[in-house]
Each structure stands twice: as C-alpha cells, then as structure tokens.
Image: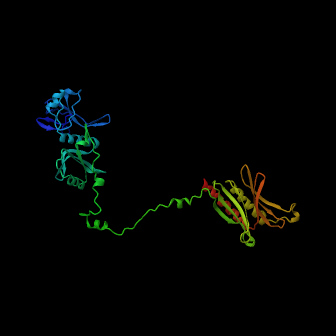
C-alpha cells in the first residue's frame, strides 16, 4: 500500500493532496490516485495511494522500510513506496481526521517552537484532550527527549501520543496510549512553582479537619431490625385515680411478627410480682371506627346517663355497649363495657377461638374513654403508615 507519491518531482503523502489528485509512483512511475479513509468490515483503512491500472489487485504489504525493485519483480505488481516514518505520519493523520472531523489536523505543525509530526487543534478545549493532540511517530529510536517533549505539550494543554511501529497494523494505528491532559497535566501536590502566592497560601499544608465515614457494624445495624418481634406502636393507661391503688391496666397497639396490627388490654394485679392478665386480638382497618364509636357509647352510656338500678336490671350484669371486631374466620373478638352487680363499669376484651374463650376484664373510670379514643386515632395512623 503506497503512502508515498510524487507530484512534479516533489514527494507527497496522502494527507497532503486533494481527493482527486494524480500522483506518480516513485517506484514504477505509473499514475496513482487517492483512496479516502474509510472503514471496511470494522477495520479502519487510512487514506492511501493506489495504482490506477491495478485496482483489482491487492497491493503488496511492506513491513519494513521502502519497497525495492526486487519486491516488484517477485510478484509483477508494484507495491509503491512507503517511507515508514512518512507512512506512520500519514496513518496517524488520517486516523485523527477520521476520529475528530471538526478539529484542525496538520502535518509538521508545532506549539511554541516545537514541531510535532502531526498536530490536532480543537476550536474549543475539549476534555480530556485539552487544546489538542500532538503526535510523535517514533521510527527506529530518533533519540528524542521523550519526557521533555511530553512535558512541553502537557504544559501547554496538549495531549501527547508517542507512536511506535508496533502501534500500527495494516492501514490503522492504535491511539490508546495517548497521554491526555486530564489527568496527566495536573500539577503535583508539591509542585507549586510558578503559582501566585495566594494559591500557595491556599494550598499550604494545614492541620486539616478529618471526616471519616465509619461503617456501622452489621450486627449493630441488624439489631434495629424488628422483624420477627412484637413492636409496640401505642400505649395508654386505662385507669388512674381511684383505682390506681389496686392494679395497673393498659391498652396497647402492637405490630405482630407477621406485620398485623393488634390491640391488647391487660392488667397487673397490685403488688410486686402480681399476676398479669391480658388478651391480644388482631385488628383490621375498619376496627378503628368500631373502636371510636365504642368509646363514644361508653362515655354516653357509662358516664353521662343514669344507670338502671339493680332492681331494674333483668340480670345482675348489664351490658352497656359492645364492639365487634372484624376478626377472622376462626376467631371472634369483641370489646364490651358492662355494669357489674356493684354498679361498677367493667371493660372486657375477649376472643373466642374454636371452643376456647379468652377474656380480660377490669374495672374502669372515665379515664378509659379518652385512652380508647386516643388509641383509636393512633391505630388509624398506624394503618395509614402501613399502606
Ligand atoms: Zn508503482
């Protein structure tokens, strides 16, 4: 594949001529045309020359240096001539033109008195390349000061690529070894030479405040996981005042390990180590309203109305009001308020599962009305949070 031609005796490489240019092969002196850069089967084919009369023939591939007449003689086809260094420049030029069609690409152009083999310049600085890209094609160690040249370009905001023969294959070149301005050109922490005093002052070593993100140990974190446990959502005492000397009684809303909201009414017999009695039943959302109207009925029937006298009651216990909870197929549950034979108001929470009845009963005063109302509100909020 020829990368060298002549026009009026002057050596040219593909980037230097127009698309429709006619060049002469320096080997066989036949005319050649330009093949534009293109892709074929996923491979990049850089701009090159081709003999007009041999379009159907595969060009020789020369791997080292210039082709000779011996090469020509062996196959009867002219491989053209390719000065390796010029070929490397041609391919690099074509590749940059292809990859950055909007940028300016020049051969033998420089930045501040240093000439690159190929220089690409962006109209606007472009991350991560900066102002542009300088290509240095290295053919058989030319003894360049690689570090010095690299620094020269990076300091001026240009990325640099040093290309060697093994970066080239076929018509293509691998540019992945590019030293990009970002992050290669960032100054070292210690290198503040040339910076204004204020920058040096700002960047001086001080005792910095330290921020550390310390991960919480898994076990500690897991201890907040309440799945598998009963979680109390709300708690209210059901009686105070005149009953407080006898025993405590409460109503609580809790979430069961299976995520169900439940209501519990319990009491503890007076004294240290007194027995606890409690019943817990499962609730549904509609039970909030049932509980609220129970509190209203209790207040009205229990504390605002005349109680029927014992004589007027047909039975010794007189039912004031009852709330039936939704329960489930196997469980019937209810909350009731009754007048005892002694004319005390007694609250009962009960449930019946199969043939077994579980019930807790306790004497209440008007405190219970407010407690139950407040529990009904909290229960409703708990249901809202669940959804
Ligand atoms: Zn030729």
Can the viewer see residue 332? yes
Quadrant for residue 231, please give it: bottom right
Residue at (20% x, 27% y) in the render: 54
Corner quadrant of residue 11: top left
Residue at the spot 40% in from the left edge and 66% down from the top edge: 210
| Residue 292 point in image, percent of width and height | 70, 59
Q: Is residue 170 above or below residue 280?
A: above
The picture places residue 49, in percent across and down from the top left corner, at 20, 34
In the image, 27 versus 297, the foreground residue is 27
x, y (%) of residue 238?
Answer: 71, 66
The N terminus appears in which quarter of the rendering?
A: top left
Q: Kindly identify the residue that appears in the image at 73 percent across and 50 percent down.
A: 330
User: Is 323 displayed left or right of 233 in the figure?
Assistant: right
- Of all residues shown, which one is farthest toward the left? 9
Q: Is residue 144 placed above or below 12 in the rendered structure?
A: below
Q: How many numbered circles does the render carry?
A: 0
- The front one of 19 and 213 is 213
Q: Is residue 254 left or right of residue 362?
A: left
Residue 92 in view: no
x, y percent for residue 114: 17, 51
Coloured how?
A: rainbow
> Where on the picture, by quarter, is residue 196?
bottom left
């Amino acid at each position: 594949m020829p990368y060298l031609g002549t026009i009026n005796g002057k050596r040219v490489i593909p980037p230097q001529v127009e698309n429709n240019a006619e060049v002469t092969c320096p080997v066989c002196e036949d005319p050649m045309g330009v093949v534009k850069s293109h892709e074929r089967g996923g491979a990049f084919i850089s701009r090159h020359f081709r003999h007009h009369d041999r379009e159907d023939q595969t060009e020789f591939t020369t791997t080292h240096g210039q082709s000779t007449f011996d090469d020509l003689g062996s196959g009867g086809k002219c491989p053209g001539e390719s000065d390796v260094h010029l070929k490397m420049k041609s391919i690099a030029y074509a590749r940059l033109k292809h990859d950055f069609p909007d940028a300016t690409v020049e051969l033998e152009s420089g930045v501040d008195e240093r000439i690159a083999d190929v220089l690409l310049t962006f109209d606007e600085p472009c991350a991560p390349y900066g102002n542009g890209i300088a290509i240095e094609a290295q053919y058989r160690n030319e003894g360049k000061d690689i570090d010095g040249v690299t620094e020269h370009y990076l300091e001026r905001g240009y990325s640099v690529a040093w290309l060697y023969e093994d970066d080239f294959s076929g018509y293509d070149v691998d540019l992945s070894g590019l030293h990009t301005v970002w992050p290669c050109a960032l100054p070292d922490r210690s290198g503040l030479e040339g910076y204004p005093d204020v920058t040096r002052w700002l960047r001086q070593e001080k005792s910095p405040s330290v921020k550390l993100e310390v991960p919480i140990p898994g076990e500690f974190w897991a201890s907040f996981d309440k799945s598998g446990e009963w979680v109390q959502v709300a708690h209210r005492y059901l009686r105070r005042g005149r009953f407080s000397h006898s025993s405590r009684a409460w109503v609580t809303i809790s979430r069961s390990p299976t995520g169900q909201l439940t209501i519990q009414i319990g009491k503890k017999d007076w004294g240290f180590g007194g027995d606890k009695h409690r019943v817990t039943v499962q609730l549904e959302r509609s039970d909030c309203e049932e509980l609220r109207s129970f509190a209203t009925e209790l207040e009205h029937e229990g504390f605002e109305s005349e109680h029927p006298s014992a004589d007027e009651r047909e039975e010794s216990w007189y039912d004031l009001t009852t709330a039936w909870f939704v329960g489930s197929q196997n469980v019937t549950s209810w909350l009731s308020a009754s007048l005892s034979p002694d004319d005390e108001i007694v609250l009962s929470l009960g449930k019946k599962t199969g043939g077994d009845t579980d019930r807790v009963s306790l004497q209440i005063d008007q405190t219970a009305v407010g407690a139950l109302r407040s529990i009904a509100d909290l229960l409703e909020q708990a249901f809202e949070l669940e959804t």
